[in-house]
Amino acid sequence: KWGMVVKMDEEEALAPLYRVRSFALLVLLPAILVAFGGALMLGRRVIVPLQNLSNSARDLAAGKFDQRVPVERADELGQLAISFNAMAERLQSSYANLEQQIEQRTAELTQSLGNMAVKDMAMSSAINAIAIAGLDGKLSYVNQAFADMWHLQGPEDAIGRSPVEFWDKPDDARQVMKALKNRGHWQGELRARLGDGGLADMQLSAHIVLDD
């Protein structure tokens, strides 16, 4: 019997594997670099603009209506930035108009309240008796002169009562109310029934005031 022993050096045996590894490194390394560069470009072209848009939207929601997004491209992201800026401009304009309207209405309300205070002071301090009745036919306001003239303890004694109660002849008072509804005003003399039971002839001037 005989045999043959073949001896091969380790480097020579693994040489094909080394060549494959070297070739793989030469191919994969540039591919990895290209992929990394593509990711950076993608981040700069897509992710960064979206992040800027997200930050601007958050600021806009917080009330900073002067936020705008720079339009640096003509693709879908550019169109999105244009739409966002248009929306922000409309919101800023609407908010400015709303603030102007609020200021105007506040000024008008302040003036109206001031005028009402002056009118109320004038009526409350007038020497003539003044009474105001609502659509329900009940007195809603009388001044101090009315209370004094009808011998009441105060204006509160007349509030909520019908004007007919303060006249001696209710039928005459109802005729006055009817004339007011038909003509809008009435002037003449009626006999009043005072709070202490006495009677007094008084000149009455009544008008219907409509709130426009």
Image (cartoon, grey):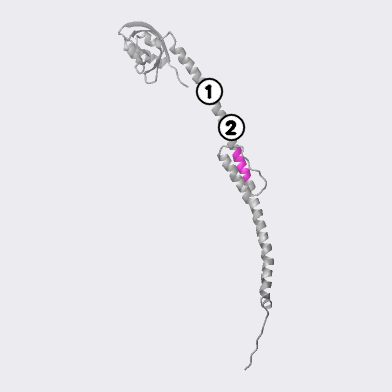
Q: Residue at x 67, y 63 (%)?
A: 29
Q: Are marks 2 and 1 in contact (CB under 8 Å)?
A: no
Number of labels in the image equals 2
Give residue 87's position: percent from left, percent from top.
Answer: 59, 40
Give left or right: position of 35 versus 168.
Answer: right
Give residue 150's position: percent from left, percent from top.
Answer: 35, 9
Residue type for callout 2: Ala
* 40 or 117: nearer the viewer: 40
Q: Dot 1, crowdedness within 10 Å: few (<14), some or many (≥20)?
A: few
Q: Secondary structure at mark 2?
A: helix
Give left or right: position of 121 versus 165.
Answer: right
Give left or right: position of 120 versus 168.
Answer: right
Please tell me whether residue 22 belongs to the stretch shown in magenta. Answer: no
Q: Dot 2, crowdedness within 10 Å: few (<14), some or many (≥20)?
A: few
In the rendered structure, which segment of residues is drawn in magenta?
Answer: 80-89
* 206 or 117: nearer the viewer: 117
Q: Residue at x 36, y 5 (%)?
A: 201
Q: Secondary structure at mark 1?
A: helix
Residue type for callout 1: Glu
Residue 2, compared with residue 51, is above or below; it is below
- Circle 2 sits on which residue? 96
Which numbered marker is on residue 206? none
Please tell me whether residue 87 belongs to the stretch shown in magenta. Answer: yes
Q: Residue at x 31, y 6 (%)?
A: 198
Quarter holding residue 177:
top left
Q: Residue at x 65, y 59 (%)?
A: 35
Give residue 186's position: percent from left, percent from top.
Answer: 41, 11
- Circle 1 sits on which residue? 108
The CA span between labels 2 and 1 is: 18 Å
